Structures are given as C-alpha cells and as structure tokens.
Image (tube, rainbow, N blue to C red):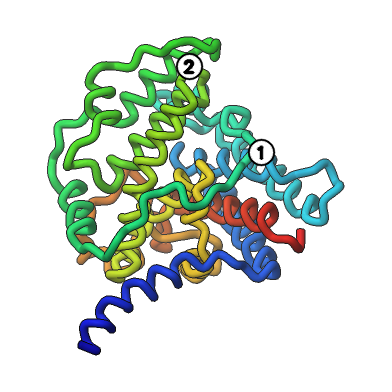
Amino acid sequence: MHRILILLLCPLLFFSLCFATVFDPRVITKIRHGIEKSLHYIEENVHRVNVDCLFGVVLTEAIMQDVYMNGSHIMDASSKNIIDKSMEIVHKAMPLVPEDKFWIAKFILVPELWQKEMVFKKGNLYSPVRPNYRIIEKIYESENVEIPLPNSDFCLHDISVWTSSLTPKTCRINKDCWDSYYGYNNISSGYTLTHKLLLLQLARARKCLIDENNYERETMKLCSSIFAEVFNGDYFHELDDIFDLFLEQVVLCGYEGYSEFFTNRWLHYILKSQEASGCFSAILTDNLKTRIKKRNMNIFEDGCVDHTTGLGAAALSLYYNFIIKESSVF
C-alpha cells in the first residue's frame, strides 16, 4: 500500500517542482550575462551563422524592446545594451544572407513584426495527468521517419509572399501546408508541432486576418501538446538528447505568454547548459548515440550550434522579460 502511494506521489511531487515559478530577482543578472554572452558568440561568428540563428537574435531584440521603458526602469540600461547589440548583429548579418534565403531576411527577420506587449498567463494549458514515456517515443519516431509533409520553409515562404504588402487581409495558405501543419493528426510531435505554431505566429505577425478566439484556441492546443513533451522529457531525463527542440518549445510557447514554460528548474537548466563562450550545443549527450535527427544547423569546431545558440538568447530574453514583469521587486 505504501509503495503504491509513493508511486502515485512521486509524479505529483515532480510536477509541483517543475511548476516552481517564484524566482530570486538576483538571478536577473545571470540571465543578462547569459544573453550578452550568446550575442557576443553570435557576433564573433556572424559570417557563418544561418538565418535560423538570426531569427533568435531578432526575437531577442523584440522581446527586450517590450521591457525597455525609455530610461525610467532600473533595468533599462541593460535592456538597451542588449537591444543595441541585437540590432548590430542583424545589421552585420544581412549582407551575408545567401540569395536563396534572402526572402527570410526580407519577410521574417524584421524585429518590428515580432514586437508586442508580452502578457503572461497561467492555467490555460492542459497539464499532463501523469508521466507518459510514449510521448517521448513519438518525438523520436516523428523525427527519424520520412513523413510526407511539405518543407516548413516552403510554407513560411508561401505565407510571406502572400502577405508581402503587410496589409491586413484574409490569407490564402497553400493547401498542402494547411492540411499538413494546421491539421491535427497522430504524427504531430517534436519539430512538427513547433513548426505548426511558428507558421500560425508568422501568419498573424504578417497581418493575416485571424479571429482572436480561434488563434488563442489553436495556440493553446499546440502549446498544451508541446508542454506535455517538455514535461515528460524532463521527467524521463531525455531533455539533454532533445535540447535544441526544448529551447524551441520554450521560445515559441513562451512568446505566447504561457507561464508554464517559465520555471526555476528549466531556467537553471538552460543557464547550466550554456558554454563559457556563450554558445549552446544542440544535444547535451553523446551525439553519436542521439535518437533524433538534427535540424538544418551549423555545428562549429567547438561543438556549438548556431540555431541552438540563437534560441538560447531568445529563451533567456523571455525569462528576463517574465521576471521583470512578474516580480514585485521590479
């Protein structure tokens, strides 16, 4: 009887620890240093980072703009330094973007598109009832099996071209993209889920007319599924093997204001995983043994990855924003 009770209580205890969101305000300094180090690393490698990395820098700038109060806030000097550094990196990188990726620079790497007032909310997501390793298995299966989905870049390009004027209008989405990414099916796991969310976010950012209630409902469904993946990845000690995906999940759902993605446990995990140089590796385990295929990313000589480092800067910026807004100290 006691053993059964312990087995029942352990997941509940873990669940409560994961949801610990009362931050020591002094951690803001560590977060700021983490962002600055990541941006320094990206700037040092600006000639060879890809556009996915630069998107992380653009999000960092947009998120920091939201908490900058024109010099009236105690953290404004730090926020302004990060904003200026982000702008400088993007300015340096633009002439280096390959011709076949220039549409991303033109239509997506635009900080103004992503600037908004961050409003955080808690209790909106469907929380996992109990740990379920099958959720993790589906991530590995979906990332290692050839699935007949259109490339997400193709779908991002389709939305970008259709909204080139940035005039609010009803958008036409390629049928294959709509069926594959906005539909729900049993293969929606891992990057497929985050790309569904990103496509929806881009459509909204580029002024597609989307009913607000529908947008909230869809993002809640997606981030509920994504949260279940993060929670189970943590519970079963699998986050090291899907670290790049974990950061992408925190960034995209955190950007939607879901407070469940901001916990002491995950913040310190991110900070601990950052290299002294400021960069991040996509996988924190033995790369040869990983069970998930890598995205299109550049792995540098030091083992760090540009895409993951850009995500790391954006994730820490979201934590910075969250703590400033939610802490009574600030």
Q: Is residue 98 visible?
A: no
Along the line of sight, the residue nearer the viewer: 244 or 330: 330
Q: Secondary structure at mark 1?
A: helix
Along the line of sight, the residue nearer the viewer: 87 or 149: 149
Q: Is residue 298 visible?
A: yes
Quadrant in which the N terminus appears: bottom left
Along the line of sight, the residue nearer the viewer: 241 or 50: 241
Mark 1 lies on residue: 87
Q: Which residue corresponds to the image point at 68% horizontal and 52% vertical from the top-left?
A: 325
Q: Position of residue 110 (x, y in %)?
A: 57, 29
Q: Position of residue 189 (x, y in %)?
A: 25, 46
- As displayed, is residue 110 above or below residue 120? above
User: How many numbered discs sit on the rendered protein?
Assistant: 2
Left/right placement of residue 312 relative to residue 240 reads right
Q: Are the residues flagged by discs 2 and 1 in contact, CB closer than 8 Å?
A: no
Left/right placement of residue 291 relative to residue 61 reads left
Mark 2 lies on residue: 209
Q: Secondary structure at mark 2?
A: loop
Q: Amino acid at mark 2?
A: Leu
Along the line of sight, the residue nearer the viewer: 82 or 140: 140
Question: Which residue, as the protein is rendered here, is positioned at the far bottom?
Answer: 2
Q: Position of residue 235 (x, y in %)?
A: 32, 69
Q: Amino acid at mark 1?
A: Met
Q: Quadrant of residue 241?
A: bottom left
Left/right placement of residue 330 relative to residue 160 reads right
- As displayed, is residue 310 above or below residue 103? below
Q: Which residue corresponds to the image point at 48% horizontal and 69% vertical from the top-left?
A: 265
Q: CA distance from mark 2 to mark 1?
A: 29 Å
Q: Which residue corresponds to the image point at 36% horizontal and 46% vertical from the top-left?
A: 297
Name the mark nearer the viewer: 2 or 1. Answer: 2
Mark earlier in primary sequence (2, 1): 1
Quadrant in which the C terminus appears: bottom right
